[in-house]
Image (cartoon, rainbow, N blue to C red):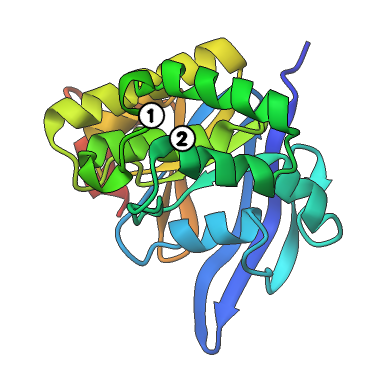
Amino acid sequence: MPVPTAIETRDLRREFGAVTAVDSLSLDVRSGEVFGLLGPNGAGKTTTIKMLITLLPPTSGTATVAGHDIIHEPRQVRRSIGYVPQLLSSDGALSARENLDISGRLYHIPGAERRERIDEALQFMGLADVGDNLVRTFSGGMVRRLEIAQAMLHAPPVLFLDEPTVGLDPTARHAVWGHIRKLREREGTTILLTTHYMDEAAELCERVGIMHLGKLVALGTPESLAVEVGPGANLDDVFTHFT
């Protein structure tokens, strides 16, 4: 029995004047999959995510997320996703619990249920002991874990992570990896992430797609793409070969 598709694009295209940022992208991400979208700066990864989360309309083509059309059903798409952008976005002047409370209110989670979900999210992300501390006292890795908790508070089936560990030290990166794996295992969440760290993609992703100059130039498991490049190749070699 085929696995349902959580994200589907068909000939998705985005132009900025004379520049084509995303060029006829056709891609399927399976339900429950951790999928990595890789590529150099300017390849079109973030533009693709912005279209899929309805922040940016496509020039042409179609896409669905969690079964909802990004053009005709944007509100349903937004209710079905969580999104963690590249730049840290939590309010440092508030506590972790207060940041989560704001997220819960934005998604209209009722009071008693919201408090329960906040407690559970803090526990799950290893932040229960610092839930009432101001976020400006947190390390970068702690802030990232809080932002993932915020993005998942309404239990969306699809989560977008745009370079989730950029700027973090190796210990913090591995901690975030562990929480991403637990999230997928516990909730069955479909996760699409972008990253420039090939070890991160190899560690977390079941499949990866490589974009270059707006086009999808390679698609497969990290292992199958390495075999395609040649004996002894790793994902760094794959990235270099295709870009």
Taking depth in this image into account, of 180 and 205 the one nearest to the observer is 180
Image quarter of residue 65: top right
Give the vertical position of 69 relative to 236 (above or below): below
User: What residue would you read off at disc 2?
Assistant: 97
Q: Position of residue 100 (x, y in %)?
A: 52, 38
Q: Position of residue 239 (x, y in %)?
A: 27, 44
For the image, the number of numbered tags is: 2
Question: Which residue is depicted at the point 75% across and 37% down?
Answer: 66
Q: Are marks 2 and 1 in contact (CB under 8 Å)?
A: yes
For the question of whether residue 203 can be seen, the reply is: no
N-terminal of the pair, mark 2 or mark 1, is 2
Question: Which residue is depicted at the point 45% across and 62% down?
Answer: 44
Q: Which quadrant holds the N terminus?
A: top right
For the question of whether residue 27 can be seen, the reply is: yes
Question: Which residue is depicted at the point 61% across and 26% down?
Answer: 115
In screen coordinates, is 19 left or right of 91?
A: right
Taking depth in this image into account, of 145 and 54 the one nearest to the observer is 145
Give the vertical position of 66 relative to 196 (above or below): above
- Mark 2 surroundings: few (<14), some (14-19) or many (≥20) residues within 10 A: many
Q: Position of residue 220 (x, y in %)?
A: 47, 31
Question: Which residue is depicted at the point 72% across and 70% down?
Answer: 60
User: What residue would you read off at disc 1?
Assistant: 131
**For the residue labelled by badge 1, is the local secondary structure a helix, a strand or a loop?**
loop
Query: Which amino acid is tagged 1?
Result: Gly
Image quarter of residue 152: top right
Taking depth in this image into account, of 113 and 64 the one nearest to the observer is 113
In screen coordinates, is 48 left or right of 97?
A: right
Query: Which amino acid is tagged 2?
Result: Arg
Q: Position of residue 17 (x, y in %)?
A: 55, 89
**For the residue labelled by badge 2, is the local secondary structure a helix, a strand or a loop?**
helix
- Mark 1 surroundings: few (<14), some (14-19) or many (≥20) residues within 10 A: many
